[in-house]
Image: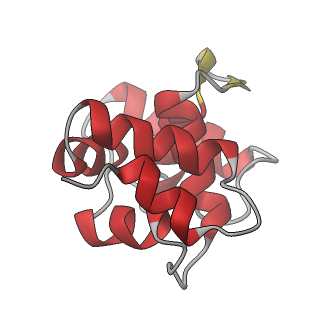
Amino acid sequence: MTHAIDTARASWPDGVPDWVAALARACDDSSQSAVARRLGRSQALISQVIRGKYPGNLTAVEEAVRGAFMGATVECPALGTMPSNVCQAWRHRARDFGNSNPLRVTMFRACNRCPRNARGGRE
């Protein structure tokens, strides 16, 4: 059985970025499926990142991994300190207005005024 961290080491010849190593270790500790669910991403995306083949925005994936698995936090003007992946999810939800509950309205307003929101939270 090949471990995800071994795959990452073989796929990133100039050195595995710390966040990709954290992603691979998380997959080894549980499963790629569980990691994908936790990040709100697909299993294919996780595999492509570990293999160094993902053609999309690695910055958005890195932010999610750092928040979910490396303890990265941001200061939210509405909710205070939160993991960066949670901030990213709120920014994504703030693309569309939803008045289903007061928190959603608050976060819609806060996220759309936030300097971290470069129009969308999940590129």
Image x and y of residue 43, in percent: 24, 63
At 32% across and 59% down in the image, what residue appears?
41
At 50% across and 59% down in the image, what residue appears?
8
Tell whether 85 sits left or right of 32.
right
Using the rendered image of the protein, determine whether residue 107 is visible from the camera's viewpoint.
Answer: no
Image x and y of residue 58, in percent: 62, 67
Q: Quadrant of residue 18?
A: top right
Tell whether 101 sits left or right of 81.
left
Q: Quadrant of residue 52?
A: bottom right
- Name the foreground residue: 114 vs 84: 84
Which residue, as the protein is rendered here, is positioned at the far bottom? 55
Position of 71 relative to 40 (above/below): above
Which residue, as the protein is rendered here, is positioned at the far front? 1
At 68% across and 69% down in the image, what residue appears?
13
Tell whether 5 sits left or right of 116.
left
Q: In what quadrant of the picture does the C terminus appear?
A: bottom right
- Name the foreground residue: 17 vs 5: 5
Using the rendered image of the protein, determine whether residue 101 is visible from the camera's viewpoint.
Answer: yes
Tell whether 50 sits left or right of 56.
left
At 50% across and 78% down in the image, what residue appears?
54
